[in-house]
Image (tube, grey):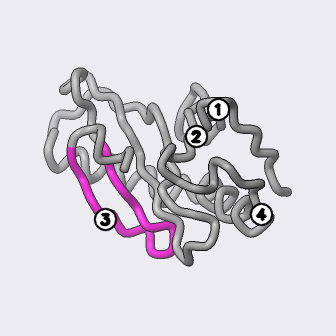
Amino acid sequence: MMREYKFDIHNEMNVAIPEEKEKVCLALSDSLEVVNEELTSSYKAKLDHLLDQSSVWYPKALEKIQEEFTDLSHARILSIFILSEQSDVDLIFGLEFGLREDSEHGRGLKFSLNSFEILEYGIGEVAYY
């Protein structure tokens, strides 16, 4: 079943994924044309696929963060940023994590939905662009 996507004036909405107790912010990047367009059914299907596959990308993200913070005590996804237009073949998305170990910067990852490959890793803002 396709979810309903109702973004607010900031191009954000809250979504649930099984790996997090609290809802997570799903945001369309402000730099995208999609923020001014009606979402196509194929784009919504990509968003559904992204959320349905959290069991694949979530552990990969944590594993990457644990390479840097071997004694990671607490990491929580704050936001999922959508970084691709509706016409793009792949959906690139960013994950912003809040960490006790670096509460000021957190960590960010950029993923490909097609391959679930981590394209970039760094401080939280990596997830935004």
Rendered residue at 52%/73% (across/down): 90
Q: Secondary structure at mark 3?
A: strand
| Element type at mark 4 | loop
Q: Is 100 above or below relative to 115?
A: above
Q: Nearer the N terminus, badge 4 or badge 1?
A: 1
Left or right, 19 with respect to 43, comes to left
Q: Magenta includes 109?
A: yes
| Callout 3 touching callout 2 (CB < 8 Å) | no
- Label 2–label 4 contact, CB within 8 A: no
Looking at the image, is mark 2 or mark 4 earlier in the sequence?
Answer: 2
Residue 60: x and y in percent read: 36, 57
Which numbered disc, 3 or 2, marks the residue that appears first in the sequence?
A: 2
Residue 2 is situated, as x and y percent measured from the top left of the image, at 82, 56
12 horizontally vs 81: left or right: right
> Which range is magenta?
108-122
> Which residue is at the front of the view, 85 or 114?
85
* Residue type at numbered disc 2: Leu
Within 10 angstroms of label 2, few (less than 14), some, or many (20 or more) residues? many
Query: What residue sits 41% from the left and 31% below the top?
Result: 76
- Say which residue label 2 marks: 26
The residue type indicated by label 1 comes to Asn
Main SS of the magenta part reads strand
| Residue 119 spot, x, y in % from top left | 31, 65
- Where is mark 3, residue-wise? 119
User: Within 10 angstroms of label 3, few (less than 14), some, or many (20 or more) residues?
Assistant: few
The mark that comes first in sequence, 3 or 1, is 1
Marks 4 and 3, the one that precedes in the sequence:
4
Give the residue at mark 4.
40
Q: CA distance from mark 1 to mark 2?
A: 6 Å
Disc sitting over residue 14 in the figure: 1
